[in-house]
Amino acid sequence: METGGKKHGHRALNSLIEKAGREKPAAIFVQTEFPSATAKTITEATSADVIALDLFSRDWLENIRITREALKGSVLRPRYTIKQ
């Protein structure tokens, strides 16, 4: 994980997972260069979909389509479970 070009470790990952647990995002976007093992950890620890975008792709329109579909899905997907 990186923030502002600086690499972070397990503490930052745990912080991200805790924040996702509180805020319940439907999707978390990562760069395609993001380690797949870390993305899998985030997916398993949260209910969020991890969506990889290639920021260096020449097909920027495809990245916009992927983002649109993910956001559309997040609007349609319930974010909270109501316990009865």
Image: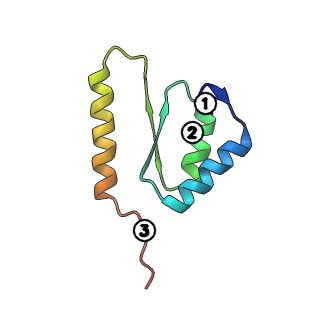
Picture layout, residue 55 above or below residue 39: above
Relative side of 65 to 5, left or right: left
Residue bearing the label numbered 1: 35
Picture layout, residue 67 above or below residue 79: above
Choose between 40 and 14: the one closer to the eye: 14
Amino acid on which disc 3 is placed: Tyr
Labels 2 and 1 touching (C-beta < 8 A): yes
Q: Position of residue 63 (x, y in %)?
A: 33, 28
Colour mode of the rendering: rainbow
- Report how far apart the C-alphas of labels 3 and 1 lie in the structure: 28 Å
Which numbered disc, 3 or 2, marks the residue that appears first in the sequence?
2
Relative side of 12 to 83, left or right: right
Q: Position of residue 2 (x, y in %)?
A: 62, 31
Residue bearing the label numbered 2: 39
Q: Quadrant of the N terminus?
A: top right
Picture layout, residue 49 above or below residue 38: below
Q: Quadrant of the C terminus?
A: bottom left
- Report how far apart the C-alphas of labels 2 and 1 lie in the structure: 6 Å
Amino acid on which disc 2 is placed: Ala
Relative side of 38 to 55, left or right: right
- Report how far apart the C-alphas of labels 3 and 2 lie in the structure: 22 Å
Instruction: Determine crowd level at label 1: few under 14, some 14-19, many 20+ residues with C-alpha closer than 10 A.
Output: few
Q: Nearer the viewer, mark 3 or mark 2?
A: 3
Q: Secondary structure at mark 1?
A: loop
Q: Secondary structure at mark 3?
A: loop
Amino acid on which disc 1 is placed: Pro
Residue at 27%, 48% (x, y): give it. Answer: 72
Residue at 60%, 48% (x, y): give it. Answer: 16
Q: Position of residue 56 (x, y in %)?
A: 43, 17
Instruction: Determine crowd level at label 2: few under 14, some 14-19, many 20+ residues with C-alpha closer than 10 A.
Output: many
Residue 80: mark in rendering: 3
Image quarter of residue 77:
bottom left
